[in-house]
Amino acid sequence: MIVGTRGSQLALAQTNQVCSDLSKIIGEKIDVEIIKTKGDKITNSQLYNMDSKGLFTKELDVALLEEEVDFTVHSFKDLPTELDEDLEIVAVPKRESPNEVLISNKTWDELGPGSRLGTSSLRREAFCNHYEKEFDLKPIRGNIETRIKKALSDELDATIMAEAGIKRLNLEKYIKTVFPLDYITPPAGQGALAIITRKDYDKKRTIAKLNHYFSMQEVLAEKKVLEELGVGCQWPIGSIARMKDKELNVYSILLTKEGEILKQHSEKGSVKNALELGGRIGRLFADYI
């Protein structure tokens, strides 16, 4: 088997973990093919100012469709709302933390007006504005280590990042604060991986053994909100689904860039109705976009 992946340290760490787990099932080594995506080549732009559809996935999809690789591993949140009709998500391994974290030498409360916070996320920008932090917001791109280094240097005062990537690279010592999910709500799919293959691939059932059912249902509910709206990272939307008391709880929040809450809503029900729960929220939010 050959797996396709992006070449960042995080992408490789994620892929290597998947390969290790899969190798235990099939009893053979998996070859890793590194593929550079359009998103990897663009380092000087705010992502929400671009056509972000498939920005970090399209080249991997092409490699799959042309049978250069057998499956690909992605951060779930990078996936476009619609996959190519010949591809499918066969597994979502057990999800890592979906929370957002602060990287800074200061606490959140110590970061006063004028503090330089690095972010290229419209959603994070909106939450900062919602809490009236009056930050001097600066664009920031680069890999996890680069962004941490910038946030702890004289260049910036802070940045906000996904806890999952930091944990996967064993860099937890740099986390200043873990934000509650309802304080800064993450993007759909944060903390989860997606394993994609061709629908006609004869070994897809073997790969599907890596699936963690509850993680898959959570992220499908979150992604369904965006699917109903037909938007990606061009709108400040946070979505999180969690299992609680044997029910799936789905919460989403839609803000303006300036931080005003346009709509927030929760749905809960059977985990097997994940798509229906996410769809309800998406249709409710449609009037505000």
Image (spheres, rainbow, N blue to C red):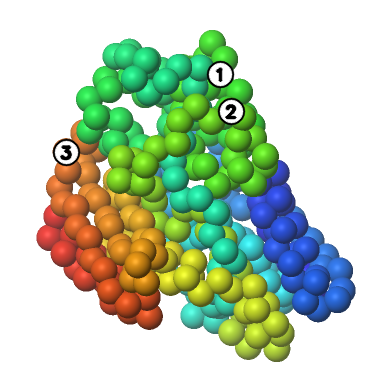
Left or right of residue 236, residue 32 in this image: right
Frontmost residue, 229 versus 207 = 207
Of mark 2 and mark 3, the one earlier in the sequence is 2
Q: Quadrant of residue 149?
A: top right
- Which residue is under mark 1? 152
- Which residue is under mark 3? 260
Q: Which element type, helix, strand or loop, lies under badge 2? A: helix
- Residue situated furthest front in the rendering: 245
Tag 2 near tag 3, CB within 8 Å = no
Q: Amino acid at mark 3?
A: Glu
Q: Neighbour class for label 1 at 10 Å: few (<14), some, many (≥20)?
A: some
| Residue beneath the point at 61% across and 30% down | 173
Left or right of residue 140, residue 70 in this image: right
Of mark 3 and mark 1, the one earlier in the sequence is 1
Of tags 2 and 3, the one toward the viewer is 2
Q: Is residue 17 above or below residue 203?
A: above
Q: Quadrant of the C terminus?
A: bottom left
Tag 2 near tag 1, CB within 8 Å = yes
- Which residue is under mark 2? 174
| Residue beneath the point at 27% across and 20% down | 134
Frontmost residue, 270 versus 16 = 270
| Residue beneath the point at 38% across and 23% down | 108
Q: Amino acid at mark 2?
A: Tyr
In the rendering, at what x and y percent does residue 194 appear? 56, 65
Q: Neighbour class for label 2 at 10 Å: few (<14), some, many (≥20)?
A: some
In the rendering, at what x and y percent does residue 214 appear? 47, 70
Left or right of residue 276, residue 66 in this image: right
